[in-house]
Amino acid sequence: MIPFKDDNPTSRFPLITIALITINTAVFIFQTLYPGSFKHSVFAYGAIPHNLLTFNTVQPIHPLMTVFTSMFMHGGLLHLASNMLYLWIFGNNIEDKLGYVKFVLFYILCGIGAAYSHSLSDPSSMAPMIGASGAVAGVLGAYLILYPQARVHTLIFLGFFIQIVKLPSFIVIGFWIIIQFINGIVSKGVASQGGIAWFAHIGGFVIGIVLIIVMSGSRKKHYY
């Protein structure tokens, strides 16, 4: 199930959404050109749970700063593309609802919450966490609250066949968060060896729900 657009018009030009996509892309290019190697950039500026919780300063910058740098870094082109696709589909509506300044604050707070959610789930880990997934998960949480019935154009894979269907966002996003919970639970039963930070996604999603209720000033849901 891969969403690629929604039928949810906006009245505000998505300046911040476009800026975030541009910054994430620029940072990824920087990673590919980083002196030493791509991997060195990840260990230098990724959010390492052990360092973040103990303030261990073995990285070039203070661990607290890696919370911010990590949310603009990605592990590969597919990682970047998938996060930016979700941000493009759902971010413009949250930006439209909150306005430019509030949306920036919302996005950053979701990213911070995601980093700490992952760190608290695996506090001894020395594997760096990178990616916009946590902040984007917050956007999905907010979208679910505000626009549960908005129609999302989605690719459904049925063996060798691909079907395009319009599904309510609560189905698309609901399916996504269920997968995160299942994988998060399963991941706790195996030795930590790096990989996807499932609890960053879950934490960002929950924080996004809380923040949109507080920041939008209303619990009213909008239907399209």
Image (spheres, helix red, strand yellow):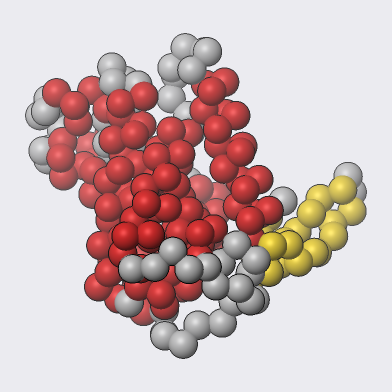
Picture coordinates of residue 92, whole percent (x, y): 46, 73
Picture coordinates of residue 5, whole percent (x, y): 63, 70
Decide if residue 98 is on the left or right side of residue 139: left
> Between 157 and 37, which is closer to the camera in this rendering?
157
**Residue that lies at the very extreme toward the bottom in this rendered image:** 11
Residue lying at 27% horizontally and 30% vertically, measured from the top left = 48
Q: Is residue 5 above or below residue 171?
A: below
Viewport quadrant of the C terminus: bottom right
Q: Is residue 220 above or below residue 31?
A: below
Q: How many marks?
A: 0
Residue lying at 35% horizontally and 72% vertically, measured from the top left = 98
Residue 222 sits in quarter = bottom right
> Between 69 and 43, which is closer to the camera in this rendering?
69
Picture coordinates of residue 207, whole percent (x, y): 37, 47
Q: Is residue 68 above or below residue 55?
A: below
Q: Is residue 36 visible?
A: no
Picture coordinates of residue 40, whole percent (x, y): 28, 36
Q: Is residue 141 visible?
A: yes
Q: Is residue 136 above or below residue 99?
A: above
